[in-house]
Amino acid sequence: MAEASATAGQQAAPAPRKKVSRAEYVIDYNEEVNPDVNVIRFIPTNSQMFEFEAGQFVSIAAVKPDGKRIARDYSIFSPPSYRDGFELCVKRVEGGFMSNYLCDLKKGDKINAIGPMGGFILRRPLPQELFFVSTGTGVAPFRAMLDTLLVKEGNTETHVYLVFGSRHPEDIIYRSHFEEMEKKYSNFHYFPTLSRAGDDWTGHRGHVQETLTKYLSDPEKKGVYICGLQIMVDQVKDLAVSKGVLPDNVYYERYD
């Protein structure tokens, strides 16, 4: 994640004041969840796990073979209720040093991380309906937010929609996890949307913008959170506002 910004119209709400820590972490597991995405769990070695809000991120630094030190930011995939460590959802980028470095880590390897940071969090009071719109690993903060709303808080009043875009069925991150959540929580609605689906796909087709458009009646009652690449974020943000969602109820985080 190259940029982490939360904006609601022209007024950005302040980020929560949490203690930011710099600590060493050991890899607990590193699992390939689809051909180019890994979920990696980090456990603190000598310190207590930091407190964070669902949607925040950590910064991880590493040294490249040429000796240059670089740092990258990643949204926290695991919910705040998990207190032993944190998880990241990392997509391998061809030619990208950090993503491949992280995806190649083995159990027992150690890294340093700084967190929590960022203001891309749930804003209270909640509207009647929340739409989480993402592509790729932009789903990471929404997994944490959904756990907070549905599991920890037991919210049954707010209807929450996860609109996730990818090309093919095998690209859908944590599909079974979100499908099980949809079965368990009647106020959660899961809309994976494929741009290159085969004839056997029975779900939404096209891009996330097209799926979102279908559900934006009574827009003043809705909140829209967007996470992913800038071109998608900008298009969804503009669409939501043009359909009548209040600008102060549109939040986003961009990865580029």
Image: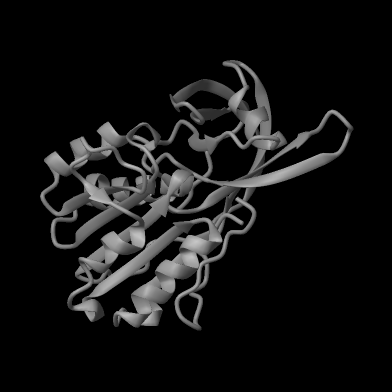
Height in image: 117 above or below 112? below
Q: Which residue is drawn at 19% across and 35% down?
A: 180
| Spot occupied by residue 198 in the image (x, y as percentages of width and height) | 28, 37
- The furthest residue to the front: 199
Q: How many numbered markers are drawn?
A: 0
Left or right of 49 on screen, residue 151: left
Give the quarter of the figure containing the C terminus: bottom right
Height in image: 108 above or below 70? above
Q: Which residue is drawn at 72% across and 35% down?
A: 97
- Does residue 17 appear anywhere in the picture? no
| Spot occupied by residue 100 in the image (x, y as percentages of width and height) | 65, 30
| Spot occupied by residue 157 in the image (x, y as percentages of width and height) | 14, 62
Q: 55 or 92, which is in the foreground?
A: 92
| Spot occupied by residue 122 in the image (x, y as percentages of width and height) | 37, 62
Left or right of 251 on screen, residue 243: left
Q: Which residue is drawn at 52% across and 21% down?
A: 28
Q: 237 or 130, which is in the foreground?
A: 237
Q: 93 or 184, which is in the foreground?
A: 93
**Hey, which quadrant is residue 181 in on the image?**
top left
